[in-house]
């Protein structure tokens, strides 16, 4: 004997019922003895509840709603049974709808809907679907018989969640089956009291019915047929990469379903467990798929956990107060009050200080629970032993489940680290003593992100994915970066199991966000064709609202305005990578605040390319400092432009011509004074000084001007060149003096003795800065460890290719921190 149960979606349409019938036929053709339990057509139970409520609220539209439900059943009959034979089924269904209409009329008139009446109303859902299918089977030549489960499933009178009287039920089921050989088509979900009053077994309870019949009949297996390929590692609607768990124990399945895996109703596992009857969870729409096999043991899995589930909407009730410490009575009393009032508790957590205890309940019952407890603990509250009972809403709970947790350590560490790195706050946590689950309460807004991040980390189905949001996509650095990522994509996937998903891009004109990812090949066309008008404010809020795990915001602009959003991005747990210097070289408070925000929210704020493009200057400096070295001084040539100019300024040249040539070759800003003024160098050395822990403001950088006032004040670039020409002699003299000493001119930024200066200096052959080619940058760190022989970093300090690769390296460093 085998019991099959088909859920709401499996019996929801003509096509799906045809699938169901095919599965039944295959079983019969193979000579198997089976009994079949059905749910109401998908959505009908909810509909009936709404209709009942409408009627009780004097909303006469309930009748129209009822008609649509009726039509749905008639349509099913029309689609399933040939026209000559429909009348019998139609008459039966019509009879039930007449009965239901009378019942609802009563509710409408007395304006009252008790739980008892509601159970009767919803029972029509299963009765109707089962009649339609039974009639269809008979029409197709199968000797089927309708069995109203109320005849045999006997319960108490807790309407909505009735408890089954197994002794009686088992006996009645066995008796019934003993006197028939027909294929039994059974209504799921419903039962009745000894007095014959209709009851229901709880939402989703048809699974339970399947299990009750399976256990009573000593079935070899109970099959739960649904719309997914078995029990999966997470709810596939929430986690795209979820996959089927081939075998699982009753206990694990129980934990997963208790914490929200709707695919099986938790109580269903108990009757099967006691009789050691395995349960298979199968897909009606993919019926060759092996699905999930639930039994006492499960094969060893390659992952440390079995699955993750969640209840999206819970409330937390908090009991706290000095009076709880060491007083065993309070928790005992709490649990007895909860039990007496049949309050179903999802999770309990007690702080080890015993100062507080909190538990999660369905949010709909939270305020009722508060009242009940305030009444129950009135004396303790009035004596000040307990504070007032508080309720926190908008929370979710997620549970990580698996037998493997018993044998492997570090799972909770990993779990909390994933949550931390994604800025997900843990409000409460509980670990079952069976070590089968760890559950955490988090804010509801974070649930999708948390499930995906945890799933990705523990199962690594498709590797880890960084979600990238790029501002300045069409700029030189932005587009070079995208090209580099595209070229490196296969390597990252095959060697690092890492994906970079480009979720958002924007330039000054257009912006585009695609949760599934934007093509790295056609992003330009996609931006142009599908992009909306750019608005950085709404781009940023979209990034935050999407709330995707492992989000990285890359700012490849030099824009002042974007920086104002950094703080809120970091606070929303989005990492930032940028070559944009504005944020770090403005007011110290801003720099400091961003550092703190990144730390606090467990994300990264990386800006290696702020200084020296792709050269590892900031990383090296941070490495020295965090490993305990002391920075004595820093000397640096940090402007590629100025390096180029002074490298090419040789005896016999006119300084003005060298500057003109640099400009013509595109090595300077459009106005060369932006480079020659030393402002850009000042920003870079300021950033390095701050990395050393100095609290310096932009004004603290002393720039000894290269240019005279006339040059600086000239109104146009042309006028500037005229003034520079007049000043030629001074530069030539500087050069001649240097050469006389066998030295060269270098524009050097120095941090020494907590002071920052930028000036034109001469250096001799022994100085590391003597040999500089082209537009190379160079930095020399004199530290406690590198005292006599400074640590020097030298190389190309400008250019799209190297800057983009520096940005890329920062992005990669985030990924290694995450895994
Ligand atoms: P039925 O109507 O067949 O009883 P349900 O809607 O009650 O089906 O349950 C099946 C649904 O459960 C799936 O469509 C899926 O979205 C959801 N679900 C939640 N968690 C899981 C999980 N871990 N594995 C499979 N399905 C899950
Ligand atoms: N029809 C009932 C419900 O929707 C029972 C079930 O589908 O399992 O809750
Ligand atoms: Mg179900």
Image (cartoon, helix red, strand yellow):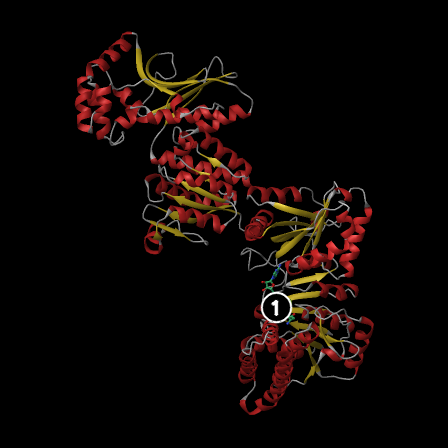
Q: Residues within 10 Å of mark 1 (few under 14, many from 20)?
A: many
| Horizontal side, residue 270 vs residue 292: left or right | right
Q: Quadrant of ligand 2?
A: bottom right
SS of the residue under disc 1:
strand
Residue 662 versus residue 266 in the image, above or below: above
Quarter of image, res 683: top left
What residue occupies the far front of the structure in this picture? 382
Query: x, y percentage for residue 41?
Result: 59, 75
Query: x, y percentage for residue 191?
Result: 73, 75
Q: Which residue is mark 1?
A: 226
| Horizontal side, residue 293 vs residue 602: left or right | right
Query: x, y percentage for residue 692?
Result: 48, 23
Mark count: 1
Residue 737 versus residue 506 in the image, above or below: above
Please name the residue shown 19% across and 22% down the image: 657
Residue 176 appears in the picture as rendered = yes
Q: Is the CB–ligand 1 distance for label 1 below 8 Å? A: yes
Query: x, y percentage for residue 271?
Result: 76, 66
């Amino acid at each position: 004997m085998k019991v099959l149960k088909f859920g709401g979606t499996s019996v929801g349409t003509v096509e799906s019922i045809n699938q169901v019938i095919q599965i039944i036929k295959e079983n019969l053709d193979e000579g198997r003895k089976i009994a079949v339990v059905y749910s109401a057509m998908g959505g009908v139970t909810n509909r009936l509840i709404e209709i009942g409520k409408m009627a009780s609220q004097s909303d006469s539209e309930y009748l129209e709603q009822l008609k649509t439900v009726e039509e749905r059943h008639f349509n099913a009959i029309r689609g399933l049974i040939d026209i000559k034979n429909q009348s019998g089924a139609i008459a039966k269904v019509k009879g039930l709808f007449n009965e239901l209409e009378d019942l609802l009329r009563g509710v409408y008139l007395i304006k009252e809907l008790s739980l008892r009446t509601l159970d009767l109303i919803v029972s029509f859902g299963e009765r109707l679907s089962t009649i339609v299918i039974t009639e269809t089977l008979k029409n197709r030549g199968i000797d089927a018989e309708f069995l109203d489960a109320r005849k045999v499933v006997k319960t108490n009178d807790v309407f909505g969640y009735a408890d089954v009287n197994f002794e009686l039920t088992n006996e009645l089921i066995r008796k019934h089956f003993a006197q028939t050989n027909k294929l039994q088509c059974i209504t799921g979900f419903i039962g009745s009291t000894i007095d014959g009053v209709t009851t229901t077994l709880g939402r989703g309870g048809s699974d339970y019915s399947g299990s009750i019949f399976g256990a009573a009949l000593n079935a070899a297996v109970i099959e739960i047929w649904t719309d997914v390929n078995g029990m999966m590692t997470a709810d596939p609607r929430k986690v795209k990469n979820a996959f089927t768990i081939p075998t699982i124990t009753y206990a694990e399945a129980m934990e997963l379903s208790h914490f929200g895996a709707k695919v099986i109703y938790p109580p269903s596992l108990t009757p099967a467990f006691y009789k050691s009857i395995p349960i298979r969870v199968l897909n009606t729409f993919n019926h060759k798929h092996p699905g999930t096999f639930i039994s006492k043991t499960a094969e060893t899995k390659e992952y440390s956990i079995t699955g993750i589930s969640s209840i999206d909407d819970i409330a937390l009730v908090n009991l706290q107060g000095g009076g709880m410490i060491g007083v065993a009575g309070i928790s005992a009393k709490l649990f007895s009050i909860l039990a007496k009032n049949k309050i179903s508790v999802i999770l309990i957590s007690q702080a080890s200080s015993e100062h507080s205890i909190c538990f999660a309940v369905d949010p709909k019952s939270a305020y009722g629970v508060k009242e009940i407890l305030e009444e129950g603990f009135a004396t303790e509250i009035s004596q000040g032993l307990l504070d007032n009972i508080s309720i926190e809403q908008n929370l979710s709970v997620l549970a990580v489940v698996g037998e493997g947790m018993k044998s492997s350590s570090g799972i909770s560490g990993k779990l909390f680290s994933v949550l931390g790195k994604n800025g997900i706050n843990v409000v409460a946590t509980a670990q079952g003593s069976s070590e089968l689950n760890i559950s955490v309460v988090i804010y509801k807004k974070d649930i999708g992100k948390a499930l995906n991040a945890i799933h990705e980390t523990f199962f690594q189905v498709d590797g880890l994915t960084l979600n990238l949001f790029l501002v300045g996509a069409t700029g030189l650095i932005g587009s070079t970066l995208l090209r580099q990522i595209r070229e490196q994509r296969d390597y990252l996937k095959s060697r690092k199991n890492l994906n970079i998903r480009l979720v958002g891009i924007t330039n000054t004109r257009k912006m585009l966000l695609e949760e599934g990812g934007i093509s790295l090949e056609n992003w330009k066309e996609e931006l142009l064709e599908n992009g909306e008008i750019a608005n950085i404010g709404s781009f940023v809020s979209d990034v935050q609202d999407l709330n995707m795990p492992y989000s990285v915001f890359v700012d490849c602009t030099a824009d002042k305005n974007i920086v104002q959003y950094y703080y809120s991005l970091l606070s929303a747990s989005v990492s930032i990578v940028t070559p944009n210097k504005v944020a770090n070289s403005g007011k110290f408070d801003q720099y400091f605040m961003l550092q703190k925000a990144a730390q606090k929210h467990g994300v990264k704020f990386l800006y290696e390319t702020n200084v020296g493009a792709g050269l590892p200057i900031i990383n090296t400096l941070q490495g020295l400092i965090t490993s305990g070295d002391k920075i004595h001084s820093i000397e640096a040539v940090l402007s590629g432009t100025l390096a180029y100019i002074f490298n090419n300024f040789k005896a016999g040249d006119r300084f003005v011509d060298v500057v003109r040539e640099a400009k013509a070759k595109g090595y300077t800003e459009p106005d060369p004074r932006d480079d020659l003024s030393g402002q850009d160098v000042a920003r870079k050395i300021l950033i390095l000084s701050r990395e050393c822990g100095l609290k310096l403001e932009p004004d603290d950088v002393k720039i000894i001007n290269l240019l005279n006032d006339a040059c600086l004040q000239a109104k146009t670039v042309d006028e500037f060149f005229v003034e520079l020409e007049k000043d030629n002699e001074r530069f030539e003299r500087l050069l001649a003096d240097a050469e006389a000493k066998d030295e060269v001119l270098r524009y050097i930024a120095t941090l020494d003795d907590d002071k920052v200066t930028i000036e034109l200096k001469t250096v001799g052959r022994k100085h590391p800065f003597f040999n500089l080619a082209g537009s190379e940058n160079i930095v020399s760190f004199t530290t406690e460890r590198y005292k006599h022989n400074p640590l020097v970093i030298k190389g190309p300090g400008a250019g799209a290719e190297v800057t983009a690769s520096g940005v890329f390296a920062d992005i990669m460093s985030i990924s290694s921190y995450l895994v």
